[in-house]
Amino acid sequence: MKITSVDIAPLNLIPVIPLTISYGSFDVLEYVLVTIHGEGGAVGYGEGAADTEVTGETQDSIITGLTPLTDEMVGRDPMDIEAIMGLLTERLPSSPTAWAAVDMALYDLMGKSLGLPVYKLLGGAVRREIAFYPTIPMDTPDVMAGYADGMYKGGFRKAKIKLGTTIDEDVERVKKILEAAPDMVLAPDINQGWRDADTAMSALERLKDAPISWVEQPVKADDLDFSREEDVLDLLDQVREMKKSSLYYVPQSYGGKSVKKG
């Protein structure tokens, strides 16, 4: 099978309520949709969320970067994913969202052409169910508790929560959420709001009794000091001492290492 065409288009999503996080509030979420057509009519879809604060990309920059490369993808075998991704990383070395959207579309096209779900292409199932969890946007503690109450009554027992202002404010948010949903497991997404490792460790110490499963983006993307292994492991040890499950940290320069301990 060969790729017959590649379409790159903006995809704007309107959340029911604005998504407020540590560095802004968004009533429109700007994505890029990649559609790859193959011989025989199979179509693969991939998407990427533009986030300037994290990757430096915008919706326009992703579209502008990918569009000239679509002709070079046409005629290739979509199963040659490594070769196609090599083209992207060479031509667009600082555009990980673009890479992700094309990668996703290629796997989707491959799976559809073979009549297999993508998880089969990635090594097969290790579990039969995956719990879905909603996201609580940043707001006052009482408003976030109200969201948690509704989610809890709707049957959810885990939620991602947006934190990242001051430690005192974030601790109060967690306290109010757990009052509304006592056994809800929380996955705090800090969106870089704690800024540095010392603040992150202090915040986690204050939250050590909360049912936290993992913490996302606790420090600034360019905090290279925090990328040092000893700093990461210190933070992971602190989470482990809380007797929670795990914490993942991927340095946001995309050139560092991934660490899991738990």
Image: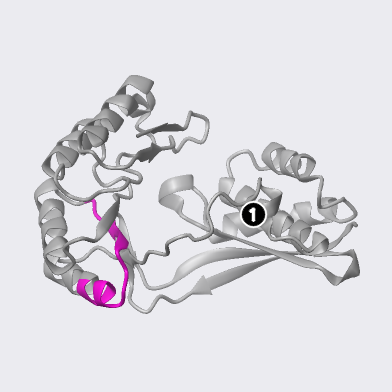
Question: Residue 139 at x, y = what percent?
Answer: 20, 66
Q: Is residue 241 magenta?
A: no
Q: Residue at x 38, y 27 (%)?
A: 227
Q: How many numbered marks does the figure carry?
A: 1
Q: Is residue 19 left or right of residue 205?
A: right
Q: Is residue 27 left or right of residue 177?
A: right
Q: Is disc 1 surrounded by few (<14), some (14 to 19) or many (20+) residues within 10 Å?
A: few
Question: Residue 15 at x, y = what percent?
Answer: 40, 75
The quarter of the displayed image where residue 61 is located: bottom right
Is residue 201 shown above or below 149? Answer: above
Q: Residue at x 30, y 39 (%)?
A: 219
SS at mark 1 in the image? helix
Is residue 62 shown above or below 222? Answer: below
* Residue 231 visible from this viewpoint: yes
Question: Residue 143 at x, y = what percent?
Answer: 17, 72
- Give the magenta part as a residue range: 149-164
Q: Nearer the viewer, residue 243 or 224?
A: 243
Question: Residue 241 at x, y = what percent?
Answer: 21, 33
Is residue 123 shown above or below 177? Answer: above
Please identify the quadrant where the C terminus is shown. Answer: top left
